Image: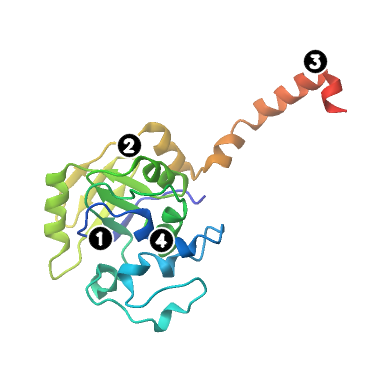
């Protein structure tokens, strides 16, 4: 997993509550277990006016002009601003895969569904919980004629707005370490490789018949 680095990115304001994982990546796209290739189908039923299927060429599909990611201001967005209970519904890990493959690295919301929230950290996405009044204020700034840009400082746990406003955020120390070091579950396990090998050698000496 790629290590998370501080960056400044455009904010896309998705002004909807209770966005579930089927809205993020519909069920017909779950046939693949690869982590890439899902970006073109992100928010498929909201983003396009036709029905999407795996393998479709999305470059010529009719776009929904009312959907935020089809607005030229947010075409290069790396930060998604959302409402409460983002990522509810099924536990499909394809949802953060699709968000990451599209290029979204941070999600700001007043609350997240638990499984989706944890899956984000395992896939290099930083989900940040902010108070509802702060989210409201950010929506006000992000929906103006010019796109809002925010600098994300993960080590400092701070968001810095265009006008130099600073917003502190909380994050679990373990998840912070995971993102900064670029560690998925396998990477975390491999940090203990010496301990694992020592255990296997000890067990081989204690019970050699298990290794015949």
Q: Earlier in the sequence, mark 2 or mark 1?
A: 1
Q: Earlier in the sequence, mark 4 or mark 1?
A: 1
Q: Indicate whether 56 appears above or below 191.
A: below
The reply to whether discs 3 and 4 touch (Cβ–Cβ < 8 Å) is: no
Q: Which mark is residue 103?
A: none
Give the quadrant of residue 11: bottom left
Q: Indicate whether 118 appears above or below 75.
A: above
Give whichever of 56, 176 is nearer the camera. 56
Residue that carries the numbered disc 1 in the rendered image: 11
Residue that carries the numbered disc 4 in the rendered image: 25
Q: Indicate whether 9 appears above or below 197.
A: below
Residue 163, percent across and down? Answer: 14, 55
Q: Which mark is residue 206?
A: 3
Which one is closest to the eye, mark 4 or mark 1?
Answer: 4
Residue 16, percent across and down? Answer: 21, 57
Name the secondary structure under disc 2. Answer: loop
Which one is closest to the eye, mark 3 or mark 1?
Answer: 3
Give whichever of 103, 161 is nearer the camera. 103
Which one is closest to the eye, mark 2 or mark 4?
Answer: 4
Q: Earlier in the sequence, mark 3 or mark 2?
A: 2
**Spatial CA span between label 4 and label 1:** 20 Å
Residue 76, percent across and down? Answer: 32, 68
Which one is closest to the eye, mark 3 or mark 4?
Answer: 4
């Amino acid at each position: 997993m790629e290590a998370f680095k501080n960056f400044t990115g455009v904010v896309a304001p998705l002004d909807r509550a209770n966005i579930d994982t089927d809205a993020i990546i519909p069920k017909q796209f779950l046939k693949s277990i690869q982590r890439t290739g899902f970006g073109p189908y992100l928010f498929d039923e909201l983003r396009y006016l036709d029905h999407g299927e795996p393998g479709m060429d999305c470059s010529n599909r009719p776009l929904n002009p009312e959907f935020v990611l089809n607005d030229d201001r947010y075409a290069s967005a790396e930060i998604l601003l959302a409402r409460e209970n983002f990522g509810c519904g099924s536990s499909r890990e394809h949802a953060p895969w699709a968000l990451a493959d599209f290029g979204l690295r941070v999600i700001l919301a007043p609350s997240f569904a638990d499984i989706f929230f944890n899956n984000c950290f395992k896939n290099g996405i930083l989900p940040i919980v902010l108070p509802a009044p702060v989210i409201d204020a950010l929506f006000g700034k992000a929906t103006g004629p010019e796109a809002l840009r925010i600098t994300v400082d993960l080590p400092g746990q701070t968001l810095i707005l265009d006008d130099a406003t600073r917003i502190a955020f909380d994050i679990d120390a373990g998840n912070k370490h995971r993102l900064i070091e670029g560690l998925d579950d396998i990477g975390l396990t491999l940090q203990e490789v010496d301990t694992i090998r020592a255990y296997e050698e000890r067990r081989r000496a204690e019970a050699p018949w298990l290794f015949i």
